Image (cartoon, helix red, strand yellow):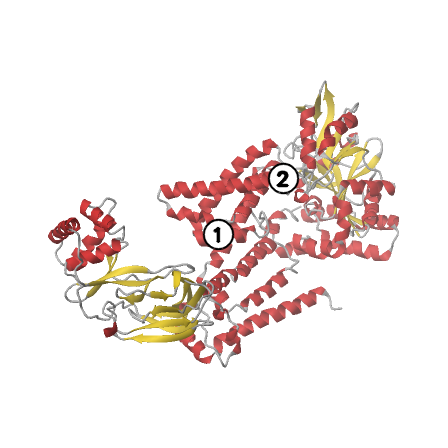
Amino acid sequence: MINSKVQIGLIAGVFIALGIGLTLYKAISLDLPLLPDQYREVWTVESKTSFTPTRAGAKSPVNIELKLPTAQAGWVILDEHFASSGFGFSIVEQSAGSNSVNASPNTSAARWTRQELDRPTTLYYKMQVYRASENAVLPALPVSVAEKPLLEPDQQAAMDRLLDRLHTQSSDIDSFVQLLLQEFLRDSPDQDTLFLIDAYEDDSFAVLMDVLAMADISAHQIRGIVLEDGRRRQTLSALIEVYNGQRWSVFDPSNASPGLPNNFFVWQRGNGSVLSVIGGRDSSLEFALVSNSLPAKAVVGMEQRSDKFAILDFSIYTLPVEQQGIFKGLLLIPVAALVVVFMRLLVGVKTSGTFMPILIALAFIQTTLFIGLAIFLGLIGIGLWIRSYLSHLNLLLVARVATVIIMVILLMAALAVISYKLGMDQVLTVTFFPTIIVAWTIERMSILWEEEGGHEVLIQGGGSLLVAVLAYLVMSNPLVEHLTFNFPELTLSLLGVILLLGKYTGYRLSELYRFRDMGTE
Amino acid sequence: MAKLISPFELRDLGILGMNARNISFIGRYNQRKNYRLVDNKLETKSAALSRGIPVPQLYGTIEYQFQIKDMLNTLIKGRDSFVIKPAQGSGGKGILVVVGRDGEQFIKSSGALIDEREVRRHSSNILAGLHSLGGRNDSAMIEALIDFDPVLKDYSFEGVPDIRVIVFRGVPVMAMMRCATHSSDGKANLHQGAVGVGIDIGSGQSICAVQHNRIVTQHPDTKIAFNQLQIPHWQQVLELAASCASMTGLDYLGADIVLDRQSGPMLLELNARPGLAIQVANQVGLRHRLAAAAKIADLTDNQIEKISLARQQFSQLTVATGQLSMAII
């Protein structure tokens, strides 16, 4: 029997060596970069088309057509992947002439077909895109003015007055469009505008398009996705593109600002529908988004070499996007655990609850540091105040903690509502704090206060917050994020280090202070 | 003030750190199955009684909330002083000391008056697990108040002083007296502000006193100087502590002993994870002592021999004066 110290040493050594070895192998022979600054932000976009068959069970064919994006405005599509189990699948090329409403030149669409279907189904299309250049110019399109709509006389009158007013206030087409969009964004729009919106059954976008058509301005909408990391249920948003006499320019109807937003991925230019479902109902199109910092070169390389290197088949990139996003967060937890082990065993910081700081740090990632700290201190402070009243009631422990949990939830709701009314949207992230953990923290702190006094509460509470902030700083570090996600085998090395720390019998930093009076006599 | 001591100096002094205590002593020598006997004061007491180790008299225990009213009435009837404590409390939490009566009311050790309702509420809190490890349901013990030796009277303020002896493999290695102060609220716990007085294993005389890990020369409330302290019945104290080691099966153990005026040394409670502040109170590290104690334990199994070897080897006063005189030269 080898003694346990040697055993731990051996196991930890193997883990550390394995982690570093695999990392170096991936870095050197697969060319994955170790530093995040040689990076391109690669977005993985997964579209989910869900629908319910109209006549389940019956022999009614289902035909789903999803327009596919073409790479434009500096974006490059690296990889596309379709999931279509049980469906006939084909990619249909459409040329510009085939559809007059669609202003885009050559578009393609994915077509899923099936003879019969008996339950709600989701079809997936996944692609990886990255921005090759900051030059966000969309290719030229043929100019065609839409037909003028036929309106009721009163609507026509309102439309004319609106057009008149906009024409007198604007100097050119660009300023005309901007004024028009601002008109629709105002808190209290003009009478005519309100009337038109009402007549169009609140479809302001349709009003916009018709106003532009009446003004003889060539315009169409651009459908695309606002890229936000970690979003699971993003839907398509729309921009407006108008021809101002020389070139096409883009406007964002949500804030009337010109130009293509940087985080907007164009799915389709033109007015045609993106998704058409025949033989189905309740169809929806949603997108899951994850951003990885990766060099385009490495991604392309991985595509070409994935057959040769089995190791990449087992990488996290092969998982569906949603799970990738979850693992991105999960893989950071071991790093935070190392911070806790380090602070407690080597520094000797007292925390309330061993791993509570990690959960608080995870909440900080969602809320950002300072807002998170403010919310957390607020919750704990008010919670302690309420809890001090509860201790007079002399309740049994389980009932007391349950009461505190409910109190915390009500507090969070109150905080969210009040701050939202005051216009402080950031405080809405209060929901990311783990309720049960906050409640237990309040309970522990309160007992500590009664038994040891406020001094000890400050020491342990301060210690927990210090560790939480450190864990947050480490977890939000781009290098750490990059390494844990791209080289998950480094977690093995972390494990090795933690095992070694578990056998550390040396002094803690705090003991150098605690025993400072030794040897002075 | 915030000067740090270098880790090398600490190692030379033989100071035992928290990590080393947890891994090399508690983890290595104390089996978890033996903790139960120590963590539950009722079990400690019955085990001690069956071995003839003196303990404070137990008037009775209350286990269920509905018993509180009747039990309290019968148990404290006709008694002027008593102590109510949780059987599984830790760190001196939840101990109510009644030293006398004033009509219908009770006098606490601090002199404050409480009525019977207050005593019942305290008992109810104990049963609900307010003071126990992990908030488990607990039972309340009602014990005789220690009438402690008058020699020690002025060393403790509004509380009973106790003597903590660390026993390693049946060999007493280090001892200190813990004196309650006003800031510790009558409790004998060092982290709550009690004074720890290092006691020489060889002679039972005081070595040095600390409060909040800093050296003090006199009691902050009673102003008595600590350098004249001599613990009576010292040999008996050490024998009592050593016999607890074989009783519990724990090789690294802290025994808390009180000196009763009539009955002499009594076992108050045991601790499987004794703290490290005793090193500051003794101005000496535990490591060298523990190594020497291991040699003594290898040498003999006889308890009396272990104690006499320990008293010879760990006698600190002559060595300390030697160091002092050297420092003066």
Tell me, for residue A363, which label it has, or none.
1
Relative to B50, A39 lies left or right = left
Relative to A246, A359 lies left or right = right
Residue B202 versus residue A118: which sits nearer the camera? A118
Q: How many marks?
A: 2
Residue appearing at x 14%, y 61% in the figure: A216
Near mark 1 (Cα within 10 A), the count class, few <14, some 14-19 or many ≥20, is many
Residue type beneath disc 1: Ala
In which quadrant of the rendered view does residue A405 lie? top right
Tell me, for residue A397, which label it has, or none.
2
Residue appearing at x 66%, y 49% in the figure: A519
Residue A488 versus residue A111: which sits nearer the camera? A111
Cα distance in 3D space between marks 1 and 2: 27 Å
Above-or-below relation of A466 to A446: below
Q: Are marks 1 and 2 on the same chain?
A: yes
Mark closer to the chain start, 1 or 2: 1
Residue A489 versus residue B57: which sits nearer the camera? A489
Q: Secondary structure at mark 1?
A: helix
Give the number of the mark in front: 1 or 2. 2
Q: Which percent across, then down, holds residue B34?
A: 78, 50
Residue type beneath disc 2: Leu
Relative to B29, A30 lies left or right = left
In which quadrant of the rendered view does residue A388 lie? top right
Furthest residue in direction bottom, as rendered: A308
Near mark 2 (Cα within 10 A), the count class, few <14, some 14-19 or many ≥20, is some
Above-or-below relation of A386 to A441: above
